[in-house]
Amino acid sequence: MKKTLLLGVLLLLLAGGYWYYRSMSSGPQYSLLKAAAAAQAHDVAAFEQYVDIESVASGIVDQVTTQSTTLKLLNPGGAAFMGSLRLLKPQLAAAARKEVQRYVETGSVEAAVAAQPKRAVNVSILGLAGKVVSPDSKFKDVKYVKEEDNGQALVGLEFTQPKYDTTLVLELKMLKRDDHWQVKQVTNTGELIRHVARLEKQRMLGK
């Protein structure tokens, strides 16, 4: 009787382990791990399989253009041209893709920014991202994963923000592809910019 019970428990554990492996290997978190591995390996083609860079950049530009006043706190004197960004969105999204590709290739933000062509309006997507997730920030945890029936998922990634002694959650919209998930948008860029601006204002007033 005991052997039968133990065998049943073992089979349940094996079935549960297999289900967990299958759900992880086909879920959004696994695709994010693959994207991170591709970036570490400097494999641009593999990275773009899991991250639609141009779509992400286009969405960031859309949200940034509504934050010109707020951005003055984070980048004094640099927000005057934000109103014109929407008109330049296609060019900026394409340029951002090249910038991120260069970053994945080299692992260097400086090299990626330096490789950008000179334009009348120069905007670095990596530079804007650095206003929210600073260089000394560290990934902390996957805060949540919300999969929907329509092949879409929202994933919250929690990062430390040592400058303000807090953490921030970056929300990614991901879409299901044939055998993997792909990041299409950072949904809360505008919200994070406003939040970081408030923290910066509090830090400045506290000095």
Image: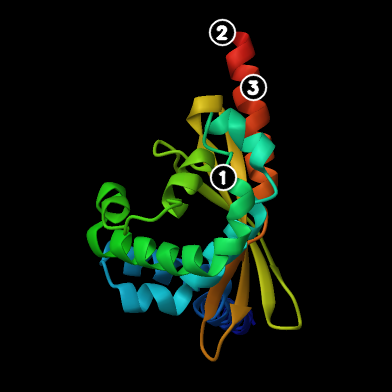
134 or 4: which is nearer to us? 134
Whether residue 30 is visible here, answered yes or no, is: no
Outermost front residue: 120
State the image coordinates of residue 136 (x, y, percent, origin top left): 40, 36
110 or 152: which is nearer to us? 110
* Residue at image mark 1: 81
Dot placed on the residue nearer the N-terminal end, 3 or 1: 1
State the image coordinates of residue 34 (x, y, percent, origin top left): 41, 71
Tell me, yes or no, whether the two marked residues, 3 and 2, touch with CB atoms within 8 Å: no
State the separation of the CA atoms marked 3 and 1. 22 Å
Q: Is residue 92 left or right of residue 136?
A: right
* Residue at image mark 3: 201
Dot placed on the residue nearer the N-terminal end, 3 or 2: 3
State the separation of the CA atoms marked 3 and 2. 10 Å
In the image, residue 99 sits, relative to residue 4, either above or below, namely: above
Is label 2 in a helix, a strand or a loop? loop
* Residue at image mark 2: 207
State the image coordinates of residue 123 (x, y, percent, origin top left): 45, 51
> In the rendered structure, which amino acid carries the disc numbered 3?
Lys
